[in-house]
Image (cartoon, helix red, strand yellow):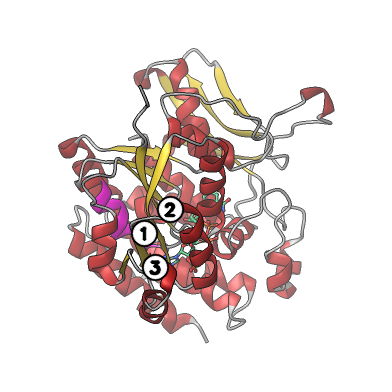
Amino acid sequence: MQKQLRKIVILGSTGSIGRSTLEVLDDHPGRFDVVGLAAKSDVERMLAQIERYRPNYVYMGDQSAADFLSGEALVKNIDVLTGDEGMITMASLPEVELVVNALVGSVGLLASLTTVENGKYLALANKESLVVGGPLFEEAVARTGARVLPIDSEHSAIWQCMASGRDSEIRRLILTASGGPFRTKKKDEFKSVTKEEALDHPTWKMGPKVTIDSATLMNKGLELIEAVWLFSIPPEMVSIVVHPQSVVHSMVEYVDSSVVAQMSAPDMKLPIAYALFWPERVRGNYGRLDLTEMQSLTFTKPDAEKFPAINLAYNAATLGGTAPAALNAANEVAVESFLLGRIGFMDITDIIEKTLGKHTVVEKPSLLDILDADRWGRKTAEGFVH
Ligand SMILES: NC(=O)c1ccc[n+]([C@@H]2O[C@H](COP(=O)([O-])OP(=O)(O)OC[C@H]3O[C@@H](n4cnc5c(N)ncnc54)[C@H](OP(=O)(O)O)[C@@H]3O)[C@@H](O)[C@H]2O)c1
């Protein structure tokens, strides 16, 4: 008897994680049926994906891109969607079991929340949605029985390490950070950092926003907040260590002082495959390690003075409520402004700090409070961009 294919939607299919997800599916034919694909404006790549995967639904964030696609002969029998309504449709298709959210930025919040509200599996790369809407997910997951499956390599590592003990036996989670391209740079050299230097990550090839987040270490800050919500753990139980080789993807320390680590060579296809096929481990060589080839594995404390993003994220996580939404909004504005050449590298965390300093936290926020904090954070941060 033929096994039924699991129906999947991939949001952000033209991006770095989205493309890796499709490669994982290609490596395991006969397991998934791609029902929907979503992107913003990359019509060329989307057309190639439509030709290859023949989805029933396609979403484009840009209206003009959606209009362009609708006119293409290849797209004749496909529903082309756009806008918030379109995103809600993509994330709530009744026939779909698993939604991969590989969008970038807080635009992913609506998709993540809709997926969870509909009781589906959410394979989550879009950490921003959990950072911004954490309190809403906790409640929705408990009510609907949805399941959030982390794709971020650090959270996948923790999830895998958590199979070694009970949740109540965890002493702390240890997130590893590569340290980014400026780990060894002196702080006074940060002033002259160019966009090209910041985009040149030593171990991971990623989209531009997450690459800049890795250079400021805000990526680790966002991951800290993501871990707090994913694993229902207070921020003070999450430590960060710098591990430039990116081989140990994160660890869990248990109450008996045992530290369990997950290792592989850096390859996002491994955590993607783990999330897609969970609870099964599928055969594969993604990130296969030869330990005898390793020179050394090193671990050091992050330099909080040089990289203020980490303490800013700890503060926002401890404040809770709408504080992480304001932090994330300020970060998105600051990173975009840096990529556009409007501000310098050091201004990124400066703008976030100033924005957070002005924020009035709503402790138990509704969705509206969170959307308000996101809007407020963007507007306030814009005011600091000169
Ligand atoms: N890359 C990594 O290795 C990595 C590792 C861990 C976690 N993550 C996280 O995964 C997420 C995606 O990262 P990435 O590096 O894959 O980003 P990316 O390469 O920039 O891709 C982003 C994707 O989102 C789409 N998109 C952006 N805005 C949209 C909108 N308004 N509506 C619909 N689609 C939209 C883009 O479409 P267009 O192509 O049309 O613009 C693209 O498909 C981020 O949250 C990141 O922090 C990434």
Q: Mark 3 points at which residue?
A: 75
What number is the disc on residue 126?
2
Q: Residue 384 carries which label?
A: none
Q: Residue 108 carries which label?
A: 1
Q: Residue 368's spot in the image, x, y percent?
A: 18, 64
Q: Inspect the image, locate mark 3, and give the three-letter code of the amino acid beneath it.
A: Val
Q: Nearer the viewer, mark 1 or mark 3?
A: 3
Q: Is residue 55 magenta?
A: no
Instruction: Report which quarter residue 234 is drawn in.
Output: top left
What is the span of residues highlighted in magenta in the rendered image?
A: 106-115
Q: Which of marks 1 and 2 is nearer the N terminus?
A: 1
Question: Is residue 111 rendered magenta in the image?
Answer: yes
- Label 1: state its secondary structure: helix
Q: Earlier in the sequence, mark 1 or mark 3?
A: 3
Marks 1 and 3, how far apart at CA: 25 Å
Q: Can residue 235 be seen in this view?
A: no
- Residue ID at (41%, 39%): 32
Q: Which of marks 3 and 2 is in front?
A: 3
Quadrant location of residue 57? bottom left
